[in-house]
Image (spheres, rainbow, N blue to C red):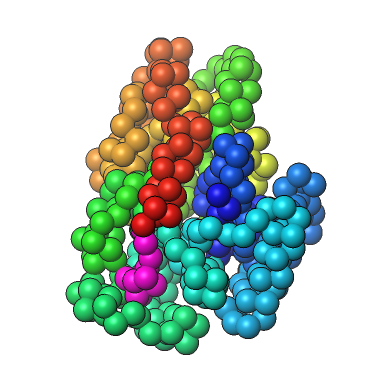
């Protein structure tokens, strides 16, 4: 089958969703299927897509929306329609064949572009909701209600009215982002989410009556290669944090907790974002330079190597992640996690692990103390068993996804 995936950001930009998309394409194509991924073209320097991947990526006309030019926006409309249709026609002529199904994995312009494409070509739609739009929007602006109203209006202008038979259902959804998402997915053949807790939340807020769980996996070959590398000797435990340095990720709270905990550990922060300079200043202010290092953004393979090398990953966001991929990657590599989000802790369900008692800096500091103390006493024992990590591999997740595609097409 030929699956068209449409998303909000280019798969080669930074982010957990982007990692998931790259893996989905790789393993679906390995299983004999064709995948085209349509997304806004990247604008940052140094963007080089491997020759083997170029045909699969459809770069839509876009405008950069961040200072580092990492992320862009493509306005849904005739221009993006024409660009997408030209690229799909070229792929079909080259032997890819026509698209069978549109899999939307975006919540904003990508979703609208995907819905327009499905309507033009008479194709079924499957939605995967990766982002908690309600939580994320409220975390960054006090004008969230206005933003949600604007999104609903934009969706209507770009896509049209909600199908008549679906209007009553969308009116029963919760207000805010939930109603916008319900209207967005109203015509979808299937709605999925990457974790059990977020699937339940989507159902509870009326986005869809039934939401399947399509958990993101980790790259079999990369995990195998990184697992094969021996971890280096260390004089004290090593902790690693990875992610976008923004408010909802609670990176500043992590730095504060490190200062409060007084743990004797080496800590590396991988990532960048709006809070990077504040993080660096706070590390200096707390006198943590001898223990805490800001490594900045790194390629995906280097991020995996950093997780493998660490004695524990620290996951700090709460209520924002719909899956939280890094603890899954860490577990596949044998590295346990110090959790702040109970939902991710419960969904992943591997041992060893530590969970902060609540959202406070003090609770995180106490978890850091407990984890580092245990690791220092028996570092070789506190690793996630390989058998637990194997169930997280992408090959297993792709087989389940193909069954869902076949079910949608069978309808």
In the rendered image, which quarter is residue 5 located in? bottom right
Figure check: 20 above or below 102: above
- Asked if residue 308 lies left or right of residue 382, the reply is right
Residue toward you, 233 or 223: 223
| 264 magenta-colored | no
Figure check: 154 above or below 340: below
Residue at the (58%, 23%) spot, across then down: 224
Residue toward you, 201 or 298: 201
Figure check: 108 above or below 385: below
Residue at the (28%, 43%) spot, across then down: 342
| 185 magenta-colored | yes
> Where does the image place residue 81, in percent across and percent down from the top left?
63, 76
> Where does the image place residue 388, in percent across and percent down from the top left?
39, 23
Residue at the (59%, 82%) spot, across then down: 77
> Where does the image place residue 74, in percent across and percent down from the top left?
62, 74
Q: How many labels does the image show?
A: 0
Residue at the (34%, 35%) spot, across then down: 348
> Can residue 228 be seen at all in this image of the molecule?
yes
What segment is highlighted magenta in the picture? Answer: 180-190
> Where does the image place residue 406, in percent across and percent down from the top left?
43, 48
Quarter in which the C terminus is drawn: bottom left
Residue toward you, 265 or 326: 326
> Can residue 317 be seen at all in this image of the molecule?
no
């Amino acid at each position: 089958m030929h699956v068209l995936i449409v998303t909000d950001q280019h798969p080669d930009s930074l982010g957990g969703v982007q990692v998931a998309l790259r893996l989905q394409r790789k393993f679906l194509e390995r299983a004999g299927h064709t995948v085209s991924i349509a997304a806004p073209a990247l604008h940052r320097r140094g963007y080089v897509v491997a020759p083997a991947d170029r045909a699969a990526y459809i770069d839509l006309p876009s405008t950069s929306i961040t200072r580092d030019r990492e992320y862009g926006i493509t306005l849904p409309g005739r221009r993006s329609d024409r660009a997408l249709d030209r690229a799909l026609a070229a792929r079909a002529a080259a032997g890819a064949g026509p698209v069978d199904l549109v899999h939307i994995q975006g919540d904003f312009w990508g979703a609208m572009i995907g819905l327009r494409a499905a309507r033009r070509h008479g194709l079924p739609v499957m939605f995967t909701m990766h982002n908690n739009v309600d939580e994320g929007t409220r975390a960054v602006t006090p004008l969230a209600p206005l933003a949600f109203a604007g999104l609903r209006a934009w969706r209507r202008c770009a896509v049209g009215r909600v199908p008549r038979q679906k209007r009553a259902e969308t009116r029963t959804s919760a207000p805010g982002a939930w109603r916008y998402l319900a209207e967005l997915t109203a015509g979808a053949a299937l709605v999925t989410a990457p974790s059990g807790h977020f699937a339940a939340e989507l159902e509870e807020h009326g986005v869809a009556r039934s939401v399947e769980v399509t958990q993101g996996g980790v790259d079999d070959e990369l995990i195998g290669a990184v697992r094969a590398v021996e971890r280096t000797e260390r004089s004290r435990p090593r902790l690693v944090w990875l992610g976008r340095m923004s408010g909802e990720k609670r990176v500043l709270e992590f730095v504060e907790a490190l200062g409060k905990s007084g743990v004797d550990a080496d800590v590396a922060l991988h990532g960048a974002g709006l809070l990077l300079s504040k993080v660096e200043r706070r590390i200096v202010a707390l006198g943590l330079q001898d223990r805490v290092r800001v490594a900045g953004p790194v390629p995906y393979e280097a991020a995996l190597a950093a997780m493998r090398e660490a004695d524990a990953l620290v996951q700090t966001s709460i209520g924002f992640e719909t899956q939280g991929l890094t603890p899954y990657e860490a577990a596949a590599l044998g590295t346990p996690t110090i959790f702040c989000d109970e939902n991710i802790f419960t969904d992943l369900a591997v041992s060893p692990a530590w969970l902060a008692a609540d959202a406070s800096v003090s609770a995180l500091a106490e978890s850091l103390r407990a984890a580092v103390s245990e690791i220092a006493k028996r570092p070789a024992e506190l690793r996630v068993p390989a058998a637990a990590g194997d169930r997280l591999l992408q090959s297993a997740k792709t087989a389940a996804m193909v069954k869902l595609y076949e079910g949608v097409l069978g309808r």
